[in-house]
Image: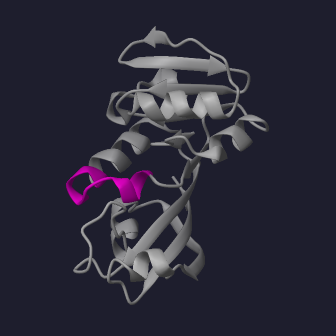
């Protein structure tokens, strides 16, 4: 599952290899994804979602907080490339709670988090540090796989003197 997937090419790559569920609020992003990947589908109503189904992929267009167990049946891996960092601090615990409620114990989450001086920028993407990740996923196994400096001209131009990406493996 790729929550808040936007029109990420990651979803196309994953769907070529695994049965994948993407969740995205913005219909324009869902349409753009399907146009760019040549996936010709017509959305069907599925509860609170428009479900765009094609080979290897179900993309649910709607609010991630409206997910039901049937939407994520069989999901045991999550690629959180940009969901947690897209959410405001007051939404994050609800988001993680939704994942924990719907997904079985043992589910692996690959989490991409960004860390920077949040006095410089209010996001999105929002800064999510290690302490917050560990608090949100308390009781789960949380391991840092990689830390990488991401400071480039885009972030310098916004006033950052440092900007980092932390990659976590979390097992619920």
Is 159 inside the magenta-drawn segment?
no
Percent position (x, y) of residue 67? 40, 28
Q: Tell me which corner region of the image, top left, top right, bottom left or bottom right, holds residue 64.
A: top left
Total number of numbered discs in the rendering: 0
User: Residue 148 or 27: which is nearer the viewer?
Assistant: 27
Percent position (x, y) of residue 50? 45, 17
Q: Is residue 106 left or right of residue 126?
A: right
Relative vertical location of residue 130 with respect to residue 43 in this rendering, above or below: below
Q: Main SS of the magenta segment? A: helix
User: Residue 73 or 17: which is nearer the viewer?
Assistant: 17
Q: Is residue 53 left or right of residue 137?
A: right
What residue is drawn where x is 52% and y is 27%?
31
Relative vertical location of residue 125 with respect to residue 8 in this rendering, above or below: below
Q: Is residue 123 left or right of residue 41?
A: left
The quarter of the rendered structure image containing the N terminus is top right
What residue is drawn where x is 69% and y is 33%?
37
Percent position (x, y) of residue 161? 38, 90
What residue is drawn where x is 44% and y is 70%?
114
Q: What segment is highlighted magenta in the picture?
A: 83-92
User: Residue 3 or 158: which is nearer the viewer?
Assistant: 158
């Amino acid at each position: 599952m790729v929550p808040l997937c936007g029109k990420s090419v990651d979803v196309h790559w994953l769907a070529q290899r695994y049965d994948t569920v993407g969740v995205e609020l913005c219909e324009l992003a869902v349409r753009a994804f399907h146009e760019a990947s040549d996936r010709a589908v017509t959305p069907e109503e599925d509860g609170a979602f428009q479900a765009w189904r094609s080979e290897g992929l179900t993309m649910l267009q709607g609010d991630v907080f409206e997910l039901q167990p049937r939407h994520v049946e069989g999901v045991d891996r999550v690629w959180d490339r940009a969901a947690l960092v897209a959410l405001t601090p007051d939404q994050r615990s609800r988001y993680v709670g939704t994942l924990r409620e719907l997904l079985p114990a043992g589910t692996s989450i690959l989490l991409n988090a960004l860390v920077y001086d949040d006095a410089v920028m209010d996001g999105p993407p929002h800064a999510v540090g290690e302490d917050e990740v560990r608090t949100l996923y308390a009781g789960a196994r949380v391991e840092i796989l990689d830390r990488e400096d991401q400071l480039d001209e885009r972030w310098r131009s916004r006033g950052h003197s440092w900007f980092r990406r932390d990659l976590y493996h979390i097992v619920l």
